Amino acid sequence: MVRFLLLFILGNTFLLQGQDITQSVTGKVKDISTFTELAGASISIFSGSELITGASTDSEGQFRFSLPPGRYRLVVSFTGYVSIENELLVIAGKMPALEILLQESPTLWLK
């Protein structure tokens, strides 16, 4: 019985060590002037210069990622808008809900 209990405890210890902790990060991308959702905006997550993951917003301007805790660089872009870049701090047990506002790019008319 003692041998079984010892094997059970050791087995569970190895299982717990193999689990990766991730945290969900959700958000919405909107136009800064009209607050309309921007479907198809590009979201990229970097760690240093390495691209970790990327996605596009859905039809309601929403996105969701699962990331391990840490510091990341969040880059958001959309055609016709100024791209933004911000630091993203992911903390275990805290689900950040981001609201990202993009501004339209100025239009230049050349003659």
Image (tube, grey):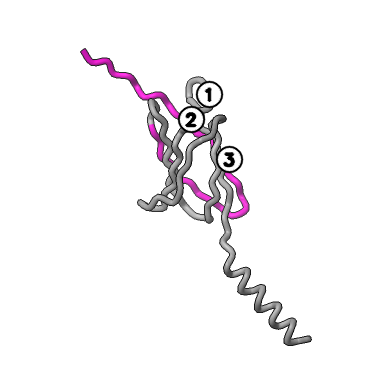
Image quarter in which the N terminus is found: bottom right
Q: Which residue is mark 1?
A: 35
Q: Quick one: label 1 or label 2, which is nearer the N terminus?
A: 1
Name the element at disc 3: strand
Task: Please indicate whether residue 29 sits to the left or right of residue 7 in the image.
Answer: left
Is residue 72 on the magenta stretch? no
Name the element at disc 2: strand
Work out how far the residue at label 3 is from the one at label 1, CA to CA, in angstroms: 16 Å
Examine the rendered structure and indicate whether residue 107 appears above or below residue 21: above
Q: Is residue 102 visible?
A: yes
Q: Are marks 1 and 2 in contact (CB under 8 Å)?
A: yes
Query: For the residue marked with disc 3, what is the amino acid?
Result: Ala
Bounds of the magenta segment: 83-111
Q: Which residue is mark 2?
A: 101
Query: For the residue marked with disc 1, what is the amino acid?
Result: Phe
Q: Which residue is mark 3?
A: 97
Circle 1 crowding by C-alpha within 10 Å: few under 14, some 14–19, many from 20: few
Residue at the far top: name it: 111
Q: Residue at x 39, y 33 (%)?
A: 83
Query: For the residue marked with disc 2, what is the amino acid?
Result: Leu
Q: Is residue 87 visible?
A: no
Q: How many numbered discs?
A: 3
Image quarter in which the C terminus is found: top left
Name the element at disc 1: loop
The quarter of the displayed image where residue 43 is located = top left
